Structures are given as C-alpha cells and as structure tokens.
Image: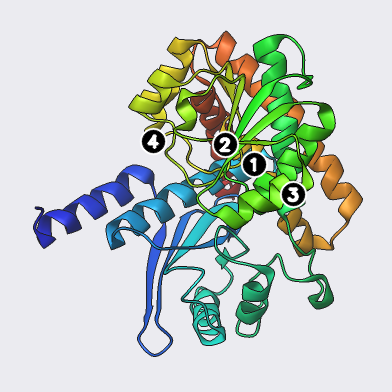
Amino acid sequence: MQTVAAQEKQIFELLTAMGHEQVLFCNDEVSGLRAIIAIHNTVLGPALGGTRMWEYASDYDALVDALRLSQGMTYKAAVSGLNLGGGKAVILGNPRQHKSEALFRRYGKFVESVNGKYITAEDVGTTKQDMEYISAETKHVTGLPEHKGGSGDPSPVTAYGVYMGMKATAKKTFGTESLNGKKVVVQGVGNVGRNLVDHLINEGAHVTIADIFEDQILAVTKKHASVKVATGDIFDLDMDVYAPCALGATLNDDSIARLKAGMVAGAANNQLKNTEIHGKMLQEKGIWYGPDFVVNAGGLMNVYSELEGYNREAVMAQTEKIFDTTLRILDIASNENTHPHEAAVRLADRRIAAIKHINSVL
C-alpha cells in the first residue's frame, strides 16, 4: 500500500508528464460536492470540456480520469480546428443517487472562480437540467436547454460524428465506407450510443449491444427489434466493428488479444488503457483504430458553436468533416508507420506549437 507521500509524488509526476496548466479540487461539505477541474492547455483558447459525474473506486482514479479526459480535449479541439483549449471536470458520486440543485449550483461557483479559463458542458452522468443549475452561478457553461438559449442535447451531434468517423475507418479497413451487413458491437447505449445505433440500423448493419443498465438496453430493443443483446463477454463475439461508447480503457492487454474485429471506432473517451502500448497492439494485430478524440468531436463542435451564435446546419456540416479528418489521420499513420492515435496526437501538437509560436511573436 502506497504512503500518502508516495501518492502525492506520483500525482505531481503525472501532472508534469501530461503537461497540465492547472488542477482544482472542489469540496463543499454542505452540498456534498466533491469535484476535480483539470485544465490541460489553453494555447488555442479557453479550456472547454464536459463535467462527468461518476462513482469512482478511489479519489486517485477520479483524478487520473480528469487528467486523461482533459488532455484528450486539448487534442480534440486542436485536430478539429477549433479555437479552444482542453479541460474536463469530474464530480465524484453516483449520478442516479447523489444529484441535487445545491450540488450543481455550488459546482457552478467553482467554475466561475476560474474566470472563464474553463467552460463546462454535459458529459457522462450529467444532463441539460444539471447544466441549467450550473448556469445559475456562472455564464461559463454550454449545452444548455433550448429554452435557455442553448443547443439542447449534444448527443445526436456526437453520435453523427462517430458515425462519420466509423465510416471513414471502415473505408480504410474494408475498402468501402458502407456499413451495410457489417457486424457492429456497440458497448454502451446511453444518449450517444442509442443515436449511433439508429444510424447503424438505418444503413443495414447487424448490431449487438451491451450496457450495465437494463433500462438503456430496453430503450434500444423496443425501438429496433433486430438489435441483439450481448450475453457474456463482448470480446468473445465475432464482429467486424467494435464501438466502445461507455467509459474508457476497454482496449487493454486482455481485450485486444481476444478482439475479433477489423476496426474500432466509438464515442468513449480514452479507449486505450495505455495509448502507446495498446495503440501499437492494435496496429500489430491489423486492427484499424479511429482515434477517440477525433471521431467523437461532434459534441465539442456543437457546444463550441453556442459561443459564437448557434447554427444547427453549420454544426452538422462541420461534424460531417470528421469523415475526412479521420481518413487523413489513418493515411498519416500508414505513411509514417505509426498507429492512428499517435498520428492524431502529432497532428494536434503541430497546430498547438504553430499557434503558440504566433502568440509569442511581439
């Protein structure tokens, strides 16, 4: 068991290695709020990223999740050509049991305290209603309900972008972007996963789903009778496409060794447990990977549009370009003999470095 001193050293080593600018720990005993705001990089603009609410196994796990998610947001904005930095927040607690107006309003005050350096939005475990509570205490929040001047639920846009990224990855994998007849396993059918299933069924894919929540499975199977529900471990299934749409790190030593798919593309963040090791494992196994922060960027594009005056048609047109961006990155991976995640990071880093240089010129 690690000592407190060893854990503190590990935390600061992690912050240094990942290059974070600022991490805030938010605590309020009265409302029960325990949260972490991680601001990774603001070279391109303010750090915009959602607030996730989840019951973590430990405080350290919550911190690591916030750090990895915020770093991914930096890359996501950079690759997508958005003038945003990367940030993310996590609230520790069960989203089905521990929510309250007071908790989210107190959290809104923490967001306000960084004076616009971090802008929050909806994420796993949070809703439009939660964003509305937050907005009572800060203007630095997006993804608000339409009656509050926001764009509403970003999930359909996120799902459409994932669908575009999936089709691009399919073109690289199978020689055609068509998903008709392809066996697709969707892990996680929350708001984004359900919308993704709609696109897949409409194109004629054979879809199997898995989720830890029975009500979410029923919502899909009632709408689409042809959808199958996975029994047992999904990595034992025969599939063409694996679409992780829940929490991260499902691509690891064990799952990749067993994975029976030609490609991976899904909505989850941080799908690779270790980006270098597991990116290479997929590459060596001949499995094409649509990098998560590339294919799931539609939601970020959607809430970013709110900052400049929301236009749904413009957002959908921009989200459709995820197809071209994904294909470009897969081609870079081929040409530079690296795995797609690394190719996407290189592309993001190049843009950040170029803009940092411009900003430093007097």
Residue 255: percent from left, percent from top: 40, 27
4 or 2: tag closer to the N-terminus: 4
Q: CA distance from mark 1 to mark 4?
A: 17 Å
Tell me if mark 1 has few (under 14), some (14-19) or many (20+) residues whose alpha carbon lies within 10 angstroms of its own: many
The part of the image, by quadrant, that contains residue 79 is top right
- Mark closer to the observer (3, 2): 3
Q: Is residue 112 visible?
A: yes
Q: CA distance from mark 4 to mark 3?
A: 33 Å
Tell me if mark 3 has few (under 14), some (14-19) or many (20+) residues whose alpha carbon lies within 10 angstroms of its own: few
Q: CA distance from mark 4 to mark 2?
A: 12 Å
Residue 115: percent from left, percent from top: 55, 75
Q: CA distance from mark 1 to mark 3?
A: 26 Å
Circle 4: residue type: Lys
Which residue sits furthest right? 313
Residue beneath disc 4 = 273
4 or 3: tag closer to the N-terminus: 3
Circle 1: residue type: Asn
Disc number for residue 222: 3
Depth check, front residue: 145 or 361: 145
Residue beneath disc 2 = 292
3 or 2: tag closer to the N-terminus: 3
